[in-house]
Image: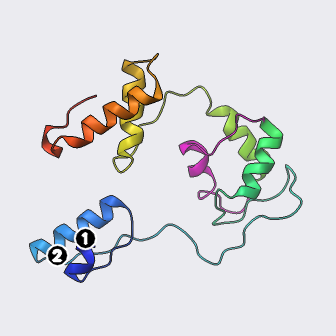
Amino acid sequence: MFARALGIRASGGKEVLAARIAAKLAGSEFVEPATARTSGSKQLAGQLTGSTLIPVGQRSSQVVRAWLTEQVGDGFHFDAEMRAFFPASDGTRTLDDAIAHWYATRDQAPREIDKQFEFNRFTRAWHARYPEGSRADLLAAWSAYRSRPIDERGRV
């Protein structure tokens, strides 16, 4: 709503929106970041096999998720490693390559969670500190954390 009141675009992620607002308030020009998504690109559908080529611009779709879950089991999910794999495809990678990538990236240390996912970052840190804590305790701690001014929010 604040962005609209300033007469600027209100869409996008938190970081982009904050940068857009900051630029407007500072009286400087904001250059929109380039989008990585290729709109209108062909997406996988129908009968998939391990030799199916992954098209350029393939998204982490429900069709691909369902197929990969059938292949590797219910533990499959589009984590950061898998979300990065599909957009990086140049049209020569196959779904078998995606499976190999899944297994090759399983025992890695958890990646840092991007700043815009504040709740996820808080949750990971809280569970590391309180491994036996309940969801109710987590949510109470989150509420207390969020009630503090931003510059007073420290670690969990």
Rounded to the nearest angstrom, the CA distance separating label 2 from label 1 is: 6 Å
Q: State the quadrant of the C terminus.
A: top left
Q: Mark 2 points at which residue?
A: 24
Amino acid type assigned to the residue bearing label 2 in the image: Lys
- Asked if residue 77 lies in the magenta stretch, the reply is yes
Amino acid type assigned to the residue bearing label 1 in the image: Arg
Relative image position of residue 154 (x, y in whole percent) = 20, 33
Classify 129 as above or below 39: above
Classify 133 as above or below 8: above
Relative image position of residue 115 (x, y in whole percent) = 33, 47
Q: Name the residue under label 1.
A: 20
Relative image position of residue 114 (x, y in whole percent) = 38, 46
**Based on the displayed image, in which of its 4 quarters is residue 1 positioned?**
bottom left
Rendered residue at 50%/66% (across/down): 36
Check if mark 2's residue and mark 1's residue have beta carbons within 8 Å: yes
Tell whether 43 sits left or right of 125: right
Q: Which mark is residue 124?
A: none
Secondary structure category for the residue under label 2: helix
Rendered residue at 76%/57% (across/down): 63
**For the magenta stretch, what is the residue range?**
73-93
Rendered residue at 32%/31% (across/down): 141
CA neighbours of label 2 inside 10 A, class few (<14), some (14 to 19), many (20+)? some
CA neighbours of label 1 inside 10 A, class few (<14), some (14 to 19), many (20+)? many
**Based on the displayed image, in which of its 4 quarters is residue 104 positioned?**
top right
Q: Which of 47 and 12 is in front in this view?
A: 12
**Dominant secondary structure (helix, strand or loop) of the stretch shown in magenta:** loop
**Based on the displayed image, in which of its 4 quarters is residue 148 positioned?**
top left
Classify 49 as above or below 144: below
Secondary structure category for the residue under label 1: helix
Relative image position of residue 119 (x, y in whole percent) = 38, 42
